[in-house]
Amino acid sequence: MTGAIHPLAALDIGGANLKAARSDGASFSLPFEVWRAPAGLAGALAEVLRRLSPFEHLAVTTTAELCDCFETKRQGVLAILEAVEKAVGEAAPRPAISVWRTDGRFAPLEAARADPLPAAAANWLALATYAGRLAPRGEALLADLGSTTLDLIPLLDGRPEPRGRTDSERLIAGELVYTGARRTPVFAVARELPYRGASCPAIPELFATMADVYVLLGDLPEEPENRRTADGRPLTRERCLERLARVIGADRESFTAAEALAAAREAARAQLRKISAALQKLEALRGRPPGAAVISGEGEFVLRRALASAWPRCERISLEERLGPEGSRAACACSLLHLLAASISHSRQSPH
């Protein structure tokens, strides 16, 4: 890409997707499974940066350090920052790099390397900080449902009020829930699925994911070129039916389209129950539901249903409506841009 240099760009480096945004409003996501090819991360990031460039300053956040190709989170953060530096080294002009941390601040690349753990799994805080600006008064909630996880971050008068900071603390607090709109295995959501008048136990194998469920239900589009599925076959309705059949020990010869829809509806209901239980846990801790919820992620359609059922009077503020579908999917990267711009502006105004 050529033309004017854009002041800012941002990267949100997840274990399965690389999400990016630029200060002119452009945003996008590219699939890259870090745990399968960690040595290829720098090359994948370089491709993302080529689509973003040219720019002067890059903000970075990561959750990919949890991938099991890394022995520790520390090792993961350091490997990811090294990949970022290598990818940026190919950019012209060479931008400055700032790393977002769980203390709610940016650090220069070398400072993040010297103390890597605060940079681990910090993207949720960037999004929550931005979301607070959209719900500046009273009690509110950020709800972000991505392909893999659900973030539920309480907001008070426009500021994040998390009880946990690390992944483990957030899991305990109910602010991080491992359920997503695409990558979650069906058996992790539904213990049983309907089949020919009975309830059949779901086989605990990676036969199908929630992407199969939502394609069958029409909530997600078919993606014939997408083979990032449980069996490596395309994400089409026909293949989704076949994968879902295996969850109950059937196949396409013994599983009709009507039976597939019934099973998919039950899996979707089961995920709604899981999300509703997480919302109720937060409500119990706060004593009442929030007045507003900022919702984002490619699973916004699921969150709308869950919130309408659990808290019908709660105002819903959709990032998809404000930023577009790609902006909502890359909401953490978009949030980083706003926070970096504010940080740069503050540093310029502060006396030296």
Image: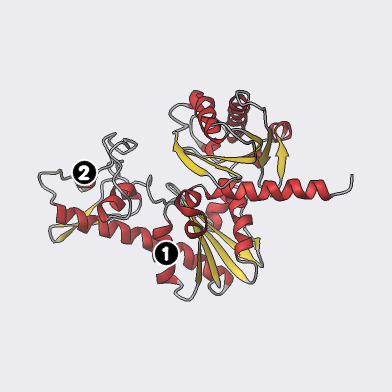
Determine the secondary structure under disc 2.
Answer: helix
Report the front residue among 4 and 305.
Answer: 4
Residue 69 seen by the camera:
yes
Q: Is residue 61 visible?
A: no
Secondary structure at badge 1 equals helix
Residue lying farthest to the front in this orientation? 3
Q: Amino acid at mark 1?
A: Arg
Q: In percent of the image, x 29 and y 47: which residue is there? A: 212
User: Disc 1 to disc 2, how far (Cα)?
Assistant: 30 Å
Q: Which residue is mark 1?
A: 304
Q: Residue at x 60, y 63 (%)?
A: 134
Residue with the mark numbered 2 = 246
The three-letter amino acid code for the residue at tag 2 is: Arg
Q: Quadrant of residue 227?
A: top left
> Residue 121: horizontal and vertical position, in percent?
58, 43
Residue nearer the viewer, 342 or 175: 342
- Residue 309 % position (x, y): 40, 71
Relative vertical location of residue 283 with respect to residue 271 in this rendering, above or below: below
Q: How is the image coloured?
A: secondary structure
Category of crowding for the residue at label 1, using alpha-carbon neighbours closer than 10 angstroms: few (below 14), some (14–19), many (at least 20): some
Label 1 vs label 2, nearer the camera: 1
Q: Is residue 163 left or right of residue 298?
A: right
Q: Which image quarter is the C terminus in?
A: top right
* Residue at far right of view: 352
**Nearer-N-terminus badge (1/2):** 2
* Quadrant housing residue 304: bottom left
In the displayed structure, would residue 57 be above or below residue 303? Answer: above
Q: Residues within 10 Å of mark 2 (few under 14, many from 20)?
A: some
Label tally: 2
